[in-house]
Amino acid sequence: MRKLTKSVVTALSLATATLSVIPQAAAPAEAAIQTKTSKEYVNGSYTVAASFYDSGSKVYSTEASFLTAAAAKVTIKSKKISSVSFTLAKDSPAYSDLTINGSKAKTSTGKDGSVTYTFAAGAYQTSSKAATFTVNGSKFSADVVFSALPSSAFVTVTETSAVVKKKVQKNSAVYNRDGAKTKYKSIKAGKTVTTYGTLTRGTTKYYKVSKTASKYIKASNVDGRYITLKNAAAVYAQDLKKTKTSYKKGKKVYAYAYAILGGEKYYKLGTNKYIKALNADGRYITVKHGAAVYSKDLKKTGSSYSEGKKVLTFGRTTLSNKKKYYQVGQNKFIVASNVDGTTRTLKKNAYIYKKSKGKAVRYKKYVLKKNSKRKTYGSAVSIKGKKYYIISVGQYVVKSNFR
């Protein structure tokens, strides 16, 4: 009979992005909220290692080596361990009267000739328990130790008790406490409901919408919001691979939450569907002074915006040179002073000029008064060898007129 080394079963878990609820208006202060957290089994079948040793020792049992090699399957039903089983190939030895921790196995034979030994839930223990069996007419005893269930066999459940009125933002199916969809009629968008606390199962949050019945709706259908795209937006999977779906500029989409993926902010639109937040969060600004486009490390990209150009921006930030910049795309920035301007004081009355055929000519009959303050944009520009500050799109004042 073959002697096999101990099988090692490693539980693998899929790392997911941290999701955050889209900020909403602050709710009124509520009474003290009671919070209860528990850990529950998740229905399903899970593989665990099972090590059989000679009784009273840590030497692997030769006679039970096929059981050790096969590993065990723990089945959970109705959030309880219901059974543990071993399945051996048809050419394995037959184990009769196989008993673990007082539970005798029931055997069944598959179409391929494999034999499954199934025990009651009590057989599964992570501490050493006795096993007895008969092989080839001889009786044997052993000690068996099962490994712990993988983390995927459990879910953390947190419940709170606050009673709050909430407006449903999107049509919402009704679920039970286990997260299974029920036959209750969906709650339509726009309806205000009284919620009786929250239920969070793993990473999914629900609002309880009945004081007594097991009725819940997903919080994402309440706490999310519709956003309007200011740019066309491609849809990405969580691994940042572009999908075949995209949305046009001006499209309204429902965002459940936001996630940080690859160091960037994305809106979650559904299961494994994300768009870059840049496409929705921006606002338009007018460039008052010709502006080169820089990367985050302050290298010129070769792109630029001309004076008067309207540009979609996604917020203002300070880069490594301590200067303010507007972000105008992914890793694209323009100097903020080309948009926001710098306030300066006139030391004497000054005319306003415009450009005409490469020359500076008077702009109407406007005169700016001495000691008045004006915003200038960007650095001074040259017109026919003379320096001027831009004070608005297409309007210039001689630089030397300012203090």
Image (tube, rainbow, N blue to C red):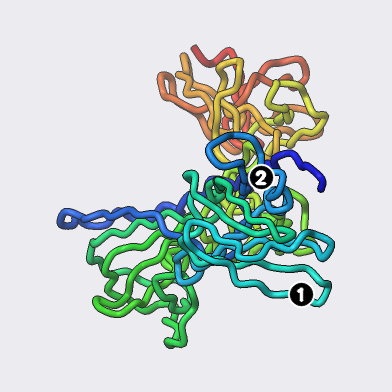
In the structure shown, which secondary structural element does the residue marked by tag 2 occupy? loop
How far apart in space, not on screen, are marks 2 and 1 (Cα)?
Answer: 24 Å
Q: Nearer the viewer, residue 320 or 180?
A: 180
Secondary element type, mark 1: loop
Taking the spot 45% from the left edge, 19% from the top edge, the residue there is 345
Relative placement, left or right, of 90 versus 176 is: right
Q: Which mark is residue 9?
A: 2
What residue does disc 1 label? 110
Which of the two labelled residues, at mark 2 and mark 1, occupies the earlier sequence position? 2
Q: Which mark is residue 339?
A: none
Q: How many badges with numbers are in the image? A: 2
Above/below status of 272 relative to 7: below
Determine which quarter of the picture holds residue 299.
top right
Kindly tell me whether residue 107 is visible in this rendering: yes
Residue 196 horizontal side relative to residue 368, left or right: left
Give whichever of 217, 297 is nearer the camera. 217
Look at the image and tell me whether residue 228 can be seen.
no
**Labelled pair 2, 1 in contact (Cβ < 8 Å):** no
Labels 2, 1: front one = 1
x and y, in percent, of residue 187 in the image: 42, 81
Residue found at x 74% / y 39%: 5
Residue under the image location 73 percent in, 28 percent down: 292
Q: Callout 1: few (<14), some (14-19), or many (20+) C-alpha neighbours within 10 Å? A: few
